[in-house]
């Protein structure tokens, strides 16, 4: 489980009683899509004809641009995660990252799921002795992609949820 038991109001939109603006919600979804896309090749090399994770990333971005509804993005995320279910290793984690990116449209706190699964994918793609180093490199890359407007929010979220996210944000 990568979501906290108690929802953080910083990841709940203003119209639902939280403090998250729509523009920041969109930035979270775009960052999550970037994280997932960075490791998507691990899935695509295993299942080149299965476009569900790629489509989910596209839908996350389309939602952030206002081109599709939250429901459409959420559905694409579910399909991407379905693509992961019978896989193992880097391909599985990459598909989950794509799914989490798309469902960020529904629950903004899934942004960290996309990042955590992408880090797990990077670690699973290398020899076990190199996994920690690969995960840390992926974590650093993700942090470099963070838009300034959401940087402090995401870094604090990583700190708060690191333990339930397999401690992948120790980079």
Image (cartoon, grey):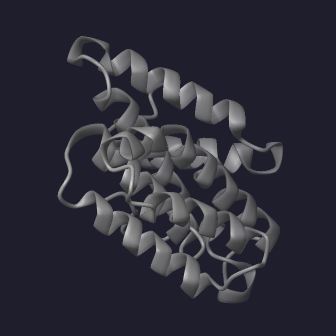
Residue farthest to the front?
A: 49
29 is higher (above) or lower (below) than 17: above
The residue positioned 41% from the left and 46% from the top of the image is: 44
68 is higher (above) or lower (below) than 132: below
9 is higher (above) or lower (below) than 97: below
- Quarter holding the N terminus is bottom left
Q: Quadrant of residue 51?
A: bottom left
Image coordinates of residue 28 in percent, x first then y, are: 67, 58
Q: Would residue 91 appear left or right of 153 to someone viewing this image?
A: left
Observer able to see residue 83: yes
The residue nearer to you, when weighing 140 against 159, is 140
Image coordinates of residue 156 in percent, x first then y, are: 60, 45
Residue farthest to the top?
A: 129
Q: Quadrant of residue 99?
A: bottom left
Q: Would residue 74 appear left or right of 4 to someone viewing this image?
A: right
Image coordinates of residue 155 in percent, x first then y, are: 61, 41
The residue positioned 51% from the left and 28% from the top of the image is: 138
What number of labels is visible?
A: 0
The residue positioned 44% from the left and 52% from the top of the image is: 97
The residue positioned 31% from the left and 63% from the top of the image is: 83
Image coordinates of residue 117 in percent, x first then y, are: 39, 46
Observer able to see residue 109: no
């Amino acid at each position: 489980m990568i979501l906290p038991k108690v929802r953080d109001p910083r990841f709940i939109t203003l119209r639902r009683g939280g403090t998250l603006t729509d523009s920041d919600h969109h930035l979270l979804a775009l960052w999550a899509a970037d994280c997932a896309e960075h490791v998507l090749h691990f899935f695509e090399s295993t299942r080149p004809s299965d476009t569900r994770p790629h489509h989910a990333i596209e839908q996350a971005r389309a939602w952030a641009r206002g081109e599709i509804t939250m429901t459409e993005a959420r559905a694409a995320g579910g399909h991407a995660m379905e693509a992961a279910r019978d896989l193992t290793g880097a391909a599985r984690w990459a598909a989950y990252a794509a799914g989490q990116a798309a469902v960020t449209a529904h629950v903004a706190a899934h942004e960290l799921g996309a990042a955590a699964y992408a880090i797990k994918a990077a670690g699973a793609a290398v020899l076990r002795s190199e996994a920690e180093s690969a995960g840390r490199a992926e974590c650093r890359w993700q942090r470099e992609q963070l838009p300034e407007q959401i940087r402090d929010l995401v870094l604090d979220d990583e700190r708060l949820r690191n333990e339930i996210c397999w401690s992948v944000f120790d980079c």
